Image (spheres, rainbow, N blue to C red):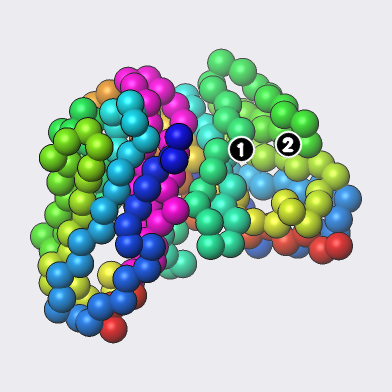
Amino acid sequence: DAGVIQSPRHEVTEMGQEVTLRCKPISGHNSLFWYRQTMMRGLELLIYFNNNVPIDDSGMPEDRFSAKMPNASFSTLKIQPSEPRDSAVYFCASKAGTGAYEQYFGPGTRLTVT
Amino acid sequence: GENVEQHPSTLSVQEGDSAVIKCTYSDSASNYFPWYKQELGKRPQLIIDIRSNVGEKKDQRIAVTLNKTAKHFSLHITETQPEDSAVYFCAASEGVRGGSYIPTFGRGTSLIVHP
């Protein structure tokens, strides 16, 4: 199993540009999570999906952020327009089944907005 | 919602010493407490977890203790080695929301083990 896959691994963009981060969960996992990690705020949950349905997006910072999961094997996190304060490492994680405990994290996308 | 406090933020020890990281949580309904290790530039990975029906769990050199009355739990690493150097995150989950255990993470502890 390849684990959770994220792309790109690094993204550098200018303020105002649209950024799309991608995630492929572990096959068979039906819960998917997007996190943001910064020195100031630590590891923050942005949104999570269960069976492709967004369950809790209360962590999404503002309307500039949106996430989709069109099928069980793919999710995107989009920032439009991006701002320098969005610079962070964004992790995707997946988990198997209702009641499963362990989350498996992807390698992360390091986003720099200049 | 749940609030998790983690201390210390940085911990420096000599190889062979023990290291202890402590966390407190606010929601008495929390019943699942995982610990993740994140090496520099890598992803967080689960190293040990404990559920509320036990007070202690051990796996080789690492152990976790839980005090539900006081709402705190700790990670203990014995005989530390340089490869234990990493950021450690505790987390607490208040149960199933929408079909999943959703952990709230502490801010992390940077453990440095000096050879």
Q: Quadrant of the N terminus of chain B?
A: top left
In the image, which residues are magenta? A87-111
Q: Which of B90 and A103 is in front in this view?
A: A103
Q: Nearer the viewer, residue B21 or A30?
A: A30
Instruction: Classify residue A44 as left or right of residue B47.
Output: left
Instruction: Tell which residue pokes out farthest to the top in this image.
Output: B53
Q: How many marks?
A: 2
Determine the image quadrant of residue A65: bottom left
Q: Does the magenta stretch include residue A108?
A: yes
Residues under numbered marks 1 and 2 in contact, where contact means CB atoms less than 8 Å apart: yes
Crowd rating for badge 2 (residues with CA inside 10 Å; few <14, some 14–19, many 20+): some
Dot label at residue B47: 1
Image position, residue B88 (x, y; %): 60, 50
**Of the residues shown, which amino acid type is indicated by label 2?**
Ile
Q: What residue is pinned by disc 2?
A: B62
Determine the chain carrying the residue at label 1. B
Instruction: Classify residue B92 as left or right of residue A79.
Output: right
Tell me whether marks 1 and 2 sit on the same chain: yes
Residue at 73% from the left image edge and 36% from the top image edge: B62
Residue at 58% from the left image edge and 62% from the top image edge: B40
Instruction: Classify residue A40 as left or right of residue A111.
Output: right
